Every structure is written in structure tokens, then in C-alpha cells.
Amino acid sequence: MKKMLKSQMKDVPEDQQKKALEMIEKNPDLFAQIGKEVQAEMKTGKDQMTATMTVMQRHKDELKGMM
């Protein structure tokens, strides 16, 4: 999974990649839930970026707490 994420974030600076991976490792259930919600939003016709932003807004307090 780490390799897949790193390939997805190849244009992101190394320190930010590390921070993101640490957040995912701390709370994998949250990120699994976010992934499911993004998929559900995409099924309603939203593009991936819009769906992701919608879901991230819903979870912004949880994400801020992890940072």
C-alpha cells in the first residue's frame, strides 16, 4: 500500500509524503472510510477531485486533529 501511495504522490515533496503516510498509519480506519465515501460521491456523478474535496470537508476536524 505504501508503494502505491508513494507512486500516487510522486510529485509531492518527500517531507509531505512522509507526513501523509504517518497520518494514514495512525488511523487507517478513518482513511478507509474516507475512501468509501469518495467512491460513493463519485457514483453520484461527481469527478474524483470534487468528491474528494467534499468528503475531506466532512472530516476536516478529524484530519486537523491528526496534524
Image (cartoon, helix red, strand yellow):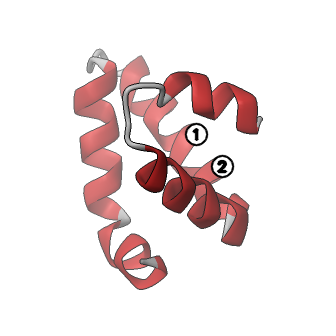
Q: Is residue 18 above or below residue 26?
A: above
The answer to which quarter of the image holds residue 25 is: bottom right
Q: Nearer the viewer, residue 46 or 20?
A: 20
Task: Inspect the image, locate mark 1, and give the three-letter code of the amino acid beneath it.
Answer: Lys
Quadrant in which the N terminus is drawn: top right
Quadrant in which the C terminus is drawn: bottom left
The residue located at (61%, 33%) in the rendering is 5
Residue 14 rendering spot, x and y as whole percentages: 47, 45
Between the residue at mark 2 and the residue at mark 1, the CA separation in whole angstroms equals 6 Å
Classed neighbour count for the residue bearing mark 2: other residues with Cα under 10 Å, few (<14), some (14–19), many (≥20): few
The residue wearing badge 1 is 36
The label nearer to you, 2 versus 1, is 2
Residue 33 horizontal side relative to residue 49, left or right = right
The residue located at (33%, 78%) in the rendering is 61
Q: Nearer the viewer, residue 26 or 62?
A: 26
The residue wearing badge 2 is 32
Determine whether the residue tagged by mark 2 lies in a helix, strand or loop: helix
Residue 29 horizontal side relative to residue 17, left or right = right
The residue located at (56%, 55%) in the rendering is 18
The answer to which quarter of the image holds residue 48 is: top left
Determine whether the residue tagged by mark 1 lies in a helix, strand or loop: helix
The residue located at (31%, 68%) in the rendering is 60
Residue 43 horizontal side relative to residue 57, left or right = right
Task: Inspect the image, locate mark 2, and give the three-letter code of the amino acid beneath it.
Answer: Ala
Q: Is residue 45 above or below residue 51?
A: above
